[in-house]
Amino acid sequence: MENKDDEVKKSQVVEARARNISHNVRCTECGSQSIEDSQADIAILLRKLIRDEIRSGKSDKEIYKKLEEEYGETVLYAPKFDLQTAALWLSPLLVAGAAAGVWGYKKHRQKTNVHTMALNLVRGVPLTPKEKETMLDLLIPPPQGLTPSSLWNRWRGR
């Protein structure tokens, strides 16, 4: 009886490890499914190969390595981090960092120009000619000529 229980436990462990590995291996025929979810012939064969390797005593790392050697790195859902894949792994961080840098620079520049000029005016510090021109551009309303909004208002009033 105890022998039978041990066999059941062992088969459950093999099945759990096989499913775990199968979820992390891409079907080479389907491409978008794991071999656990795929019903392609190659997926069925790979699931059987994984179970056989587990029964023969190999570790998960050894099985992944064998699959990678036979089918290439693309068979694994999580490729290794090395020099060849560093750009792939780091590109989202670089893009997000660059976007945050540009946004921060624009905000800083926008704040410093207008706020510094306003503070200087309040404190009585004279403005440079460039600062005076910028301040006047900000404070003087645009001319009431033919602007898109004035054309819209005229059209709506008819």
Image (cartoon, rainbow, N blue to C red):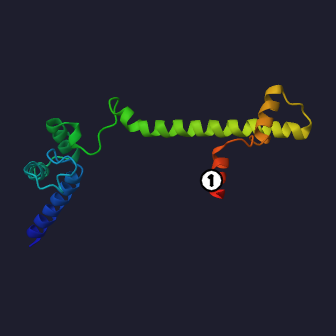
Q: Amino acid at mark 1?
A: Trp
Residue, far bottom: 1
Tell me if 26 is positioned left or right of 154 in this view: left
Image-quadrant location for residue 4 = bottom left
Which residue is painted at 8% across and 73% down in the image? 1
Give percent across and percent down for residue 6. 13, 65
Give percent across and percent down for residue 92. 43, 40
Report the quarter where the C terminus lies. bottom right
Closest to the observer, 115 or 101: 115
Give percent across and percent down for residue 61. 23, 44
Give percent across and percent down for residue 99. 53, 38
Please, what secondary structure does the residue beneath circle 1 have? helix
Closest to the observer, 46 or 140: 140
Which residue is painted at 20% across and 60% down in the image? 16
Residue, far front: 158
Disc 1 target residue: 155
Tally the marks.
Answer: 1
Residue 142 against residue 35 in the figure, above or below? above
